[in-house]
Amino acid sequence: QVQLVESGGGLVQAGGSLRLSCKASGDLSDIGVMSWYRQAPGEQRDLVAEITRGGATTYVDAVKGRFTISRDNVDDTVYLQMHHVKPEDTAVYYCKAIVAVHVPSFFPVWGQGTLVSVSA
């Protein structure tokens, strides 16, 4: 069984910073792309940023220049450093990883979500 456990969410004032973490555990053979998504109340879940095993990154325009995604391939952890947060960043943030127990059979796994609330 593979699990993703997120941490680091909470309440932060606009303009502040927050760092989210997501650690993968279980019977893993390999981890491919790791991603952060977010879902605001009444909205769909949308991609925020993703990072390949080699470190190539992609960001949605709304967070470019403010958020940084990184990963530790030894610790099987992905991070989302958030700077200059805005009230519109308020959402539940979900971690997603494409993992393999038996290579090359990869499949997606989601974390349980962590709430980020940004006050004006």
Image (cartoon, grey):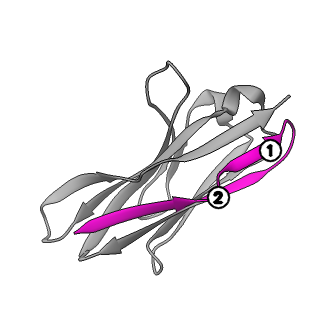
The image quarter containing residue 48 is top right
Residue 33 is one of the magenta-drawn residues: no
Q: Magenta segment, principal secondary structure?
A: strand
61 left or right, relative to 48:
right
Q: In this view, does 67 lie above or below 5?
A: above
Q: Residue at x 39, y 62 (%)?
A: 4
| Callout 2 secondary element | loop
Relative image position of residue 81 (x, y in whole percent): 69, 54
Q: Residue at x 43, y 73 (%)?
A: 76
Relative image position of residue 82 (x, y in whole percent): 72, 48
Question: Which class describes the residues within 10 Å of circle 1: few (<14), some (14-19), or many (20+)?
Answer: some
Q: Is residue 16 above or below residue 26?
A: above
Q: Where is mark 2, residue-wise? A: 8
Q: Where is mark 1, residue-wise? A: 12
- Give amino acid for label 1: Val
The image quarter containing residue 28 is bottom left
Q: Nearer the viewer, residue 71 or 40?
A: 40
Q: What stretch is highlighted in magenta?
A: 1-20
- Give amino acid for label 2: Gly
In the image, farthest residue toward the bottom:
74
Identify the image quadrant of the C terminus. Answer: top right
Q: Which residue is drawn at 47% across and 46% down?
A: 94
Q: In this view, does 87 lie above or below 17?
A: above
Residue 9 is one of the magenta-drawn residues: yes
